């Protein structure tokens, strides 16, 4: 089944962290995928969002500067 979901991406320059929102909901658990990647899950285990720590080491500064938008995602 295809659902239209609004994905939102934000970057915090001071924290050098990027957060990708996949869907709204209450965070029940945060899973550490690596030292720099965290996943927020709801009580059913669905991914609500993903945080990238030290984002500038994972993306070029040019790419990061262009991030902060909302777009429909089909999941």
Image (spheres, helix red, strand yellow):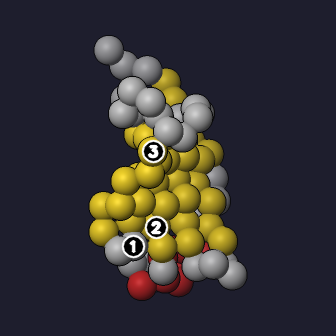
Q: Position of residue 25 (x, y in %)?
A: 58, 32
Which residue is rendered at x = 56% and y = 72% of the image?
Answer: 17
Q: Which element carries disc 1, helix, strand or loop? A: loop
Q: Left or right: where does residue 43 sit relative to residue 26?
A: left
Gap in angstroms between the C-alphas marked 3 and 2 = 16 Å
User: In the visual, does 14 lie left or right of 6?
Assistant: right
Lower position in the chain sequence, tag 2 or tag 1: 1
Name the residue carrying label 3.
29
Using the numbered discs, state the Cα–Cα distance from disc 3 to disc 1 in whole angstroms: 17 Å
Q: Nearer the viewer, residue 64 or 18?
A: 18
How crowded pointer 2 is (Cα within 10 Å; few <14, some 14-19, many 20+) is rated as many
As measured in the structure, the alpha-carbon distance from the residue carrying label 2 to the one carrying label 1 is: 6 Å
Expressed as whole percent of the image width and height from the top left, the position of residue 61 reads 53, 83
Identified at 63% across, 78% down, the residue is: 15
* Label drawn at residue 36: 1
Q: Quadrant of the C terminus?
A: top left
State the residue position of label 2: 52
Give the x, y percent position of residue 8. Answer: 59, 47
Q: Secondary structure at mark 2?
A: strand
The residue closer to the viewer here, 50 or 5, is 50
Visible in this render: residue 74?
Answer: no
Quadrant into which the N terminus falls: top left
Mark 2 and mark 1 residues within 8 Å of each other at the beta carbon: yes
Left or right? Give the position of 45 relative to 62. left
- In this rendered view, identify the residue nearer to me: 47 or 69: 47
Does label 3 or label 1 sit earlier along the sequence? 3
């Amino acid at each position: 089944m295809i659902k239209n979901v609004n994905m939102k991406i934000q970057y915090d320059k001071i924290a050098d962290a990027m957060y990708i929102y996949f869907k709204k909901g209450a965070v029940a658990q945060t899973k550490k995928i690596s030292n720099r990647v965290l996943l927020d899950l709801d009580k059913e285990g669905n991914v609500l969002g993903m945080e990238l720590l030290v984002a500038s080491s994972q993306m070029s500064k040019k790419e990061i500067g262009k991030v902060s938008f909302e777009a429909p995602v089909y999941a």
